[in-house]
Amino acid sequence: MTYRIRIPAEIGFEKVDSDMRKLILAAAMIIGGTAAASAADMRMPTKAPIMAAPVYSWSGFYIGGHAGYGWGDTDARWDPLPSPAAFNADPVARNLKGDGFVGGVHVGYNWQFAPQWLLGIEADWTSTSIGESQTQGVNFFGGAPAPPASTTLGRDVNWLASFRARVGLLATPSFMVYATGGLAIADIDYNGRFNNNSLTYLANVSLNETNTGWVAGAGAEWALSQNWLLRGEYLYYRFDGTSALFNSAVFPAFPVRFSWGDTQIHTLRAGLSYKF
């Protein structure tokens, strides 16, 4: 684009004094430079705006597996009935502990309802090898031993299952800590045996029960990528106990009772999940 400064013909450029000519030339150069810069700016391509990286979303279904270590605790007892005095033997009480491997699968859904908060539901099934059996000699009422009488008490946890809610707090967009709790189910074998060979007396019971209880715990989870989640968690389970009465045909007047108190189970496990 060209700009011209027109000087009236009657004046004539040669009639303009030297200072005026300098001023006119300077003005023409300024106007010409501004116009050229504007034209150049119009020809320059517009830069695309810088887009922020997308924030990770925890919402969605997931499925995975877990494995770890567990340990349990159950108080068990053998009672001679109708009373210790009548049976002439002291009760036998043992604390059954035991530990072992735990491993299984889980499936769930997360809903990230706020930038830093998450709600979820999860179901899982876990196989375990947590079990223990103890044998103790029986004493006569008052403490004297009654050889060869003995009592064996045992408890084995075959598997655990749970249906839990989860509440998570996002410390960073890809790292969450959470609390969890809900309904728990356990398949447990109970066994008890009293044997007094000198009297040809044998009491033997074996029970398999599917017990319901509750579970609570906490954990942390990392989003390794858009689809893979890594977790570590602790869970505490509690289940009611059971009992069984055995009445021998040899001594029908002297039944015995085997009983197991509440079972407490602790697990520490790591898990890997795939998020859809």
Image: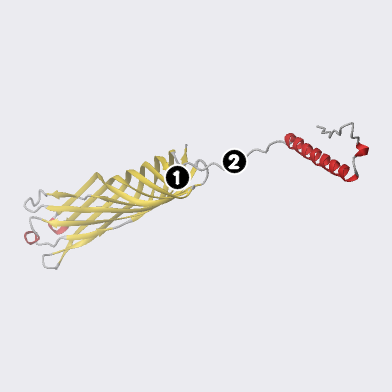
Classify residue 159 as left or right of residue 12.
left
Q: Is residue 232 visible?
A: no
Q: What amino acid type should be assigned to the residue bearing mark 2?
A: Met
Q: What amino acid type should be assigned to the residue bearing mark 1?
A: Pro
Measured as percent of width and height from the top left, residue 8 is found at 86, 32
Q: How far apart are marks 2 and 1 (CA)?
A: 19 Å
131 or 114: nearer the viewer: 114
81 or 28: nearer the viewer: 28
Whichever of labels 2 and 1 marks the residue nearer the N terminus, that label is 2
Q: In which quarter of the image is residue 118?
A: top left
Asked which colour scheme the image uses, the reply is: secondary structure
Measured as percent of width and height from the top left, residue 171 is found at 45, 51
> Which residue lies under the disc numbered 2?
51
Measured as percent of width and height from the top left, residue 80 is found at 12, 57
Classify residue 67 as left or right of residue 31.
left
Asked if residue 167 is positioned above or below residue 136 in the image, the reply reads above
16 or 216: nearer the viewer: 16
Q: In which quarter of the image is residue 50?
A: top right
**SS class, disc 1:** loop
> Which residue lies under the disc numbered 1?
115
**SS class, disc 2:** loop
Write the residue at 40% across / 47% down.
168
